[in-house]
Structure formats: structure tokens, C-alpha cells
Image (tube, rainbow, N blue to C red):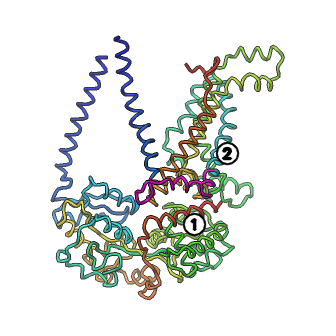
Amino acid sequence: MQTKNTKTFYLIPYFAWILLFVIAPIALIAYYSLFDLSGNFTLDNYKNFFTSIYLKLTLSSFWYAFLITFFSLIVAYPTAYLLTKTKHKQLWLLLIIIPSWINLLLKTYAFIGIFGLYGPINAFLNVFGFGETQILFTDFSFIFVSVYIFIPFMILPIFNALDKLNPSLIDASRDLGASSWTTFTKVIFPLTTNGVKAGIQAVFIPSLSLFMITRLIAGNKVITLGTAIEQQFLVTQNWGMGSTIAVFLIIFMVIVMIITGQREKGATSNGKN
Amino acid sequence: MRDIIKAAVAIIIVCIALFFVNDYLNKSSGKASSDTVTIYNWGEYIDPDLIAQFEEESGYRVVYETFDSNEAMMTKIEQGGTSYDIAVPSEYAIEKMKENDLLLPIDHSMIPNLKNIDPYFLDLSFDPKNEFSIPYFWGTVGIVFNPSLLDGQTFDSWEALWDPSLKGQVLLVDSAREVIGMGLNSLGYSLNSTDENELAEAAAKLSKLTPNVKAIIGDEVTQLMVNEEAPVALTWSGQAADMMWENEELDYSVPEEGSNLWFDNMVIPKTAANVVGAHAFINFMLDAEVAAQNADYVGYSIPNAAAMELMDEEVISDERFYPTEETRDHLEVYNNLGLEMLGNYNELFLKFKMSTN
């Protein structure tokens, strides 16, 4: 009995937290989404969402989130692989993590200077005879900065998965005559998919609702669901519509979680549980 | 187990102790009492020396806080729990605050310096007879540009922004009223238009501007213009004055088709704790010398005729920042359009932003 009571006692903070900071806010968002500007109960907000502008917004958010995740993955996987091969991997890992301790807004402001017409990148391009190039406020700068900001969250889970991979499996694969490429596609990658999935979750979902970077780096030429929510709450003061977009954002996030969710069967090699 | 309880109890005791300390500090610093005046103003919108001077002359202690948008300011006052004695909203926000019953009437007999204000700025449509508000600064919306980066274009007309030679060069402010207003003005319509066809026409006109748009941003405009990252930007007169202060190449123009004329005004929110002190502060700010010093520091245009006599002739005769009454008549003040219309403006603006890429 003693242990059961203790267990219940320990669960109280957890449930209180979940109730206050997860369930209650989501319930409030859902509740607010059902009211229009004058406080009448209505489903119009949901109807409005399915007009062309918000659908287009959703599609473009997904497209940019996809690009950010894709480039993060392309860079992160080889990096993580290389890290597992280095001598002082914890040190190298730390060097990758440290930038994520710096405030996101500060890093973003730094890029305004770096990408500026008279910034170091343009100075570098000038050396090679390129004229002043507009880098800031382009798709390129937006994707680049977003990837820079999110990449630690992609590297970490992949690194963990690779690091826990049993090297004898790779040896076995090579012994049995598989080429390096076959070893990678048939052994290494399948055994680290959980790390990749966790990385995709950690990058794709926040990318959907990025908003300060869209203004500072993309000059509002890229609009995400996050920007739209901010506008509805702060400028238009249409909390109903803002909440409705937030409800859809939550739904999209749940869908992404389900698609990239970890399957509970068999022995996973990433060492969870 | 026992340790956890001990730790929890310790934390609770510390919290309670901190609460009392905080309470004590607030009391001893005189928060929200009758010998302080709490002022809620825009950032960089007063000469700090004047606060010290007011404290000395009046004996009140000043608590000074800042906000960065009318909406944020209104939300904070509406939610209560604050005791601002003075706030400085723009005209359309005053209309809204009056509607929501957030303001206290101002007793003109306690503000003898009101006589210093140019009558042009009194008794305006958003607050007849200045029952609730006293003018603080005013200005316009226009185009700031850098002739050294352009081939002699001028911006006497909004049309100039549509010039194909400005491809990817124009900075806009991230604000629906200013940008849609510009679209309406460029067609000769009122920037308070609620006519669906006029708004649709303005949106169509703006969609032709998209190739020229470099970015739609907030206060970063100042830095980008000063650093010559862009040659042209839509902005407010005071912000333009700031930029021109830092980079002398820059110039400012209010297009002749019309634009926005705005007024920021001192008001006394309903939650004020020191109404007498608030009146004393308003009266102090209207003093000719004080207002002149403040205008010199802040860089926006003042409505204070007596103060203008004390100011540098060069500053007040600069028609870019002190446009003649004739020019001002072309300009329009924002009306409070109501939340629904504001929502329409914002949706058009959102569509515009999405089409810029």
C-alpha cells in the first residue's frame, strides 16, 4: 500500500502540470475559436479558415517547414555520423549544442548584419567579382537561418541513435560481403530511423509556427501560420479567428506526430526504455 | 519523502517572505500612492531630464513605463491591475478607449498652459472639446528616401513607388492601416474608406507594387535606411526624423495625393491613482520651455505654439515635418473603423504580403 500511495503522491505534480499547462490552454483555445468578434457563438471562424487565403497560407507553411526539415536532415545526418567517429565526441557535440543556448532573437538579429548589403558575406562575394547581392529577405536567407537555428535539434537524436548502434552489426554486414552503400541503406539507416523521426518532429513542428524570423529575415515575404496567429491576436484582436488557426495548427501537429511516431514493436536500437 | 516535504515547505516559506518584501518595497517606493505619478508612454518619447525636472518642481516621484503599440497599451489598461496616471494613445485609440469607458475627463482649469497649444490641434473629431485628451506630439506618414542611391526620383506622389526602376528596393511598414491606406490614397480615395469596391481596387493596385517590395518590416526600417541597405521606405515622420539625424543623405516627403495625419495625446486612464498629479504633469509638459526642450530631444512635431517660438527657426520652418495648414488639410486622421473593418483591412494586407514572394 505504501508504494501505491507514494506513487499517487508523486503523480500529483505531473497531473497538475498537465491539467494547468496542457489541457486547460488547449481547451481555452478550442473554446475561443467558437466565438466571433462580437462574442456570438458561431462556426464561421472554421468556415473562414477554408477560404483560399488561409488554405494557401497552410500550404506555404507546410512547404517551408518541409524545406527546412529536409535541409536540416541532409546536413545533420552526415554530421551526426561523423561525430560518432571522432575521438572527443562529447566535446564536438557540446560545440554544436552551445549556440542553441543563445537567445533565438539575438542570433536572428545577427544575421541581419551578416546578410546585409555591406555585410561580410557580400564583402566575400565581392572578392570574387560578384556585385552586391540581395541575400536578406529572400527564401534562401529564410531557409538558411531557420536550418541554422533548428539543426542542433536534428543532430542530437540522430547522434544518439547512431552512437547506440552496435558496431558488430556493421562488421557482420561487411563480413557477409555488403558494400558500404548497402550496409548504410540496409543496416545503419533502418536502425536509426527512430532518431531521424524524432529529429523531424523536433524541426518540422516548430517550423510550422515560426514567426519572428519570417519578419526579420524574410521581410514578411514568407508567411507562416504562426505569423497569422500573432496578427489575429495583437493587431486585429480577433481572438476567435486566431484561436481557430491555432486549433488547426494543433491538429496538423498531431498528424505529424502520428506519422513520425515511434512504433512500439520489436527491439529499437536507440536505447529508449 | 520527508526531504521533499521539507524542501517544499522551505520554498513556500521563501515565497511568502518574498511576497512581503515585495509588498514592503512597493509601499516604500510609493507605488500607486498619492505622491507618485505613473506615466505610460511610447519608447524614446520624452527627454529624461524633463522627468527629473518635474520631480523636482512638483515634489512627485515619477514611475515611468513604456509600450510599443496602442493595442498593447489598451489591453493592459483594460485588464486592470495597473495604476497609470498618464498614458499617450493615438487618436483612433482614444476613440476606442472612450467607447470602452477607460478614460477620466480632464479638468481644464487645472491646466492653464493649455493656452500654449495651437488651436488647430484642439477640439478635433476624435475628442471634441478635448474632454479626455491633451495633444502631445503629431506627425504624418510618408516616404523616406536616399537620393544618393536613386537617379533623381522624387516622391511627391505615391505613384513614384510603383516605378519599375525600384524593383526590389522598397521597404514597407508591417502595419495594415498604413499600407492599405497608401493604396487607397494613391487612387485618390480616403484612407478611412469602408467601401468594398474601393478597397478591392486598392488591393489590386497594391498587388502591382509587389515586384518593388524588398521587405515588410517593423522598427528595423530605421537601421536599414541608415545603413543604406535600401533607398526608399514608407514610414512615420518622427521615425524619418530619427533616420535623417543619423544619416544626412536621407530626405522625407509626404505625397500630395494625401496621407495620414496622426496625433498622440496625453490622457488619464480610469485606473489612475493620482489624478491631481496627472493634471500637474500634463500642465508641466505644455509649458513652452519644457515642450521646446522635449521636441528638440524627441524629434517629432509639437502642437505647442508658444514652444515653437522658442525653437530653432530652421526646425519649425521645415515643411517636411511642420507642413503648412494647407498641406495638412489634404491629410486625413485615422477613424476607428471597428474591429470587423480592421479585420478586412488585415485580410487584404495578409493577401498582399503573401503575394510578395
The quarter of the image holding the N terminus of chain B is: top left
Distance from disc 2 to disc 1, alpha carbons, whole Å, reads: 26 Å
Left/right of residue A78 with respect to residue B134 in the rendered view: right
Name the quadrant containing residue A169. top right
**The quadrant where residue B208 appears:** bottom right
Residue nearest the observer in this picture, A126 or B301: B301
Instruction: Give the amino acid type for the residue marked by disc 1 in the picture.
Output: Leu
Q: Which residue was labeled with disc 2?
A: A67
**In terms of depth relative to the viewer, which is nearer, B88 or A106?**
B88
Q: Mark 1 lies on which chain?
A: B
Which mark is nearer the camera, 2 or 1?
Answer: 2
Among the 4 quarters of the image, the one containing residue A127: bottom right
Magenta span: A35-58
Return the x and y of residue B63 as percentages of the image width and height: 25, 57
Where residue B227 sits: x, y (%)? Answer: 55, 63
Image coordinates of residue B342 in percent, x first then y, are 47, 66
Q: Quadrant of the C terminus of chain B?
A: bottom right
Q: Sort mark 2 into few (<14), some (14-19) or many (20+) by Cα contacts within 10 Å.
A: some
Give the secondary structure at mark 1: strand
Please name the residue that numbered disc 1 is placed on: B171
Disc 1 crowd, CA 10 A, few/some/many (<14, 14-19, 20+): many
Task: Indicate left or right for B93 with A58 as reference.
Answer: left
Q: Is residue A102 above or below residue A232?
A: above
Q: Residue drawn 20% across and 46% down? A: B25
**B245 inside magenta stretch:** no
Above or below residue A2? Residue B258 is below
Image mark 2: chain: A
User: Quick check: can you spot residue A119?
Assistant: no
| Amino acid of disc 2 | Leu
Q: What element carries label 2?
A: helix
Where residue B136 is drawn, which disc sits there?
none
